[in-house]
Image (tube, rainbow, N blue to C red):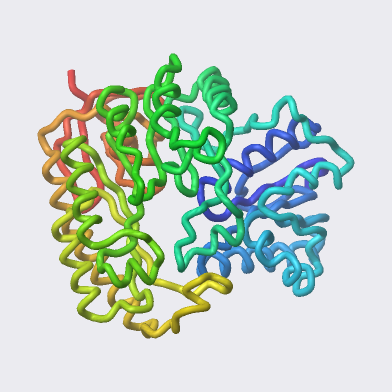
């Protein structure tokens, strides 16, 4: 056990990661040594930043907490604290069921941990962070919460209504990160297209991205996560005009059948979804579209699922993730619908959908053979340097592999690469002369 040392374990999404990075910075300002996601916990204190979105994520969080409770009983750690979405949603239940945890904090009151440790929160560094990502890229969270109220989603129950960060605060953070060497920025929120309505009375995501792109040193800007209804089309104008705004959009569509979409409270129809995808590609012909789809939602029979498969064949998404519906306590879907699709059927549909996407992905990637792509290098791994194009977001998207034997490459630097081969997901490149 290392005294005056804190281990922080982050579960869930990149929005949680930003919170952990802010906490790391505050702890360091108060004299602590902090390790993030260590292979073995050795600090006298451990903080777990939990996810509570779906059943699998909740199970992972609970298992991690219980594992650390055992480490505490064995004397390998002294204090255990829990924060994040799971404890925000189930604070009373967790306090009762897992008393070994010294204290549970929610999604937003994690700053109280410093006070409980006899330390203070440094408001002069409110949004300062100790990056846990490679130093050349960072996530920038522009809002909390969500107003969309999709029937299946527990996020509004956890994080509340949408709250935009003031634009000047975001721009200041980006400028600070550029000074630290960050070149690539993933703009994140539960829903970015709603940005600004609560503060400025209108959608301001296009203006925000435009102003970020004006900051000297910002090389790439990538956007996660959009919503199809009331989409701010001026955002695509910025994407076309600004070379440092990646031709990339992550927009969760969830389904294509109108009745299923109605049950989901998505406020969009099948026809409107087709028109939405067509317009995105018409206005930005080389745009990379990433989406997320759901199988097994109440109302999805075999015909509705086949309609979803047909849509995916037509849309040929560059990137696609999918998951099976799980009933979440307190959501409109849990109150209104019976979870009627058997688990085995959900899994079968999920496997079929992802197999289709794997075939599409292989074809999409093969079309890039012979092209030249700008690639940023993330790391060296075995016999390859590993990088990404503007169409690849960290952690979730395919990568570009370049043989180490081709010559030395610097992490965080950009290179023009000729794509010489491809598999189902990844590309293989060589540096152009």
Where does residue 293 sit, x and y in percent of width and height? 33, 62
The answer to whether 402 appears left or right of 5 in the picture is left
Query: Can residue 213 be seen?
Result: yes
- Above or below, 120 relative to 276: above
Query: Can residue 389 be seen?
Result: no
Q: Residue at x 63, y 63 (%)?
A: 64
The answer to whether 246 appears left or right of 117 in the picture is left
Q: Residue furthest top?
A: 216
Q: Quadrant of residue 77?
A: bottom right
Q: Quadrant of residue 173?
A: top right
Q: Residue at x 42, y 27 (%)?
A: 207
Where does residue 377 sit, x and y in percent of width and height? 36, 30
Where does the C terminus fall, quadrant-wise? top left
Q: Residue furthest right?
A: 118
Work out whether residue 401 or residue 206 is closer to the camera in this orientation and state it: 206
- Above or below, 151 relative to 392: below
Where does residue 119 sit, x and y in percent of width and height? 85, 38
Where does residue 25 sit, x and y in percent of width and height? 69, 33
Q: Residue furthest front?
A: 201
The answer to whether 44 appears left or right of 427 in the picture is right
Q: Residue at x 33, y 35 (%)?
A: 387
Badge count: 0
Work out whether residue 392 or residue 123 is closer to the camera in this orientation and state it: 123
Q: Residue at x 41, y 72 (%)?
A: 325
């Amino acid at each position: 056990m290392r005294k005056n040392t804190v281990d922080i374990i982050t579960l869930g999404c990149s929005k949680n990661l930003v919170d952990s990075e802010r906490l790391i910075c505050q702890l360091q300002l108060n004299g602590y040594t902090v390790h993030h996601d260590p292979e073995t916990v050795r600090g006298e204190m451990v903080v777990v930043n939990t996810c509570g979105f779906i059943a699998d994520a909740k199970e992972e969080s609970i298992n991690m907490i219980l594992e650390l409770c055992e480490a505490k009983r064995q004397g390998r750690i002294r204090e255990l604290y829990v924060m994040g979405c799971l404890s925000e949603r189930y604070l009373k239940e967790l306090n009762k069921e897992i008393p070994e945890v010294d204290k549970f904090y929610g999604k937003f009151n994690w700053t109280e941990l410093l006070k409980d440790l006899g330390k203070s929160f440094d408001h002069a560094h409110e949004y300062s962070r100790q990056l846990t990502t490679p130093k050349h890229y960072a996530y920038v969270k522009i809002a909390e919460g969500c107003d969309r109220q999709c029937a299946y989603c527990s996020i509004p129950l956890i994080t509340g209504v949408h709250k935009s960060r003031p634009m000047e605060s975001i721009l200041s953070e980006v400028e600070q990160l550029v000074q630290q060497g960050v070149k690539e920025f993933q703009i994140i929120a539960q829903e970015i297209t709603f940005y600004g309505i609560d503060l400025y009375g209108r959608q301001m995501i296009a203006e925000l991205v435009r102003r970020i792109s004006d900051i000297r040193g910002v090389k790439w800007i990538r956007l996660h996560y959009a919503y199809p209804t009331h989409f701010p089309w001026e955002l695509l104008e910025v994407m076309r005009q600004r070379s440092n705004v990646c031709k990339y959009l992550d927009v969760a569509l969830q389904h294509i059948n109108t009745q299923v979409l109605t049950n989901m409270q998505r406020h969009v129809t099948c026809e409107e979804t087709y028109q939405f995808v067509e317009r995105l590609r018409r206005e930005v012909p080389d745009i990379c579209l990433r989406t997320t789809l759901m199988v097994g939602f109440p109302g999805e029979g075999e015909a509705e699922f086949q309609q979803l498969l047909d849509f995916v064949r037509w849309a040929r998404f560059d990137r696609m993730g999918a998951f099976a519906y799980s009933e979440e306590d307190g959501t409109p879907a849990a109150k209104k619908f019976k979870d009627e699709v058997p688990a085995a059927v959900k899994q079968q549909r999920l496997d079929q959908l992802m197999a289709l996407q794997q075939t599409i992905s292989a074809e999409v990637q093969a079309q890039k053979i012979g092209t030249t792509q700008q690639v940023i290098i993330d790391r060296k791994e075995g016999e390859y340097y590993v990088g990404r194009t503007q169409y690849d977001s960290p952690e979730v998207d395919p990568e570009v592999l370049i043989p180490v034997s081709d010559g030395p490459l610097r992490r965080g630097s950009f290179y023009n690469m000729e794509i010489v081969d491809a598999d189902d997901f990844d590309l293989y490149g060589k540096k152009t002369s």
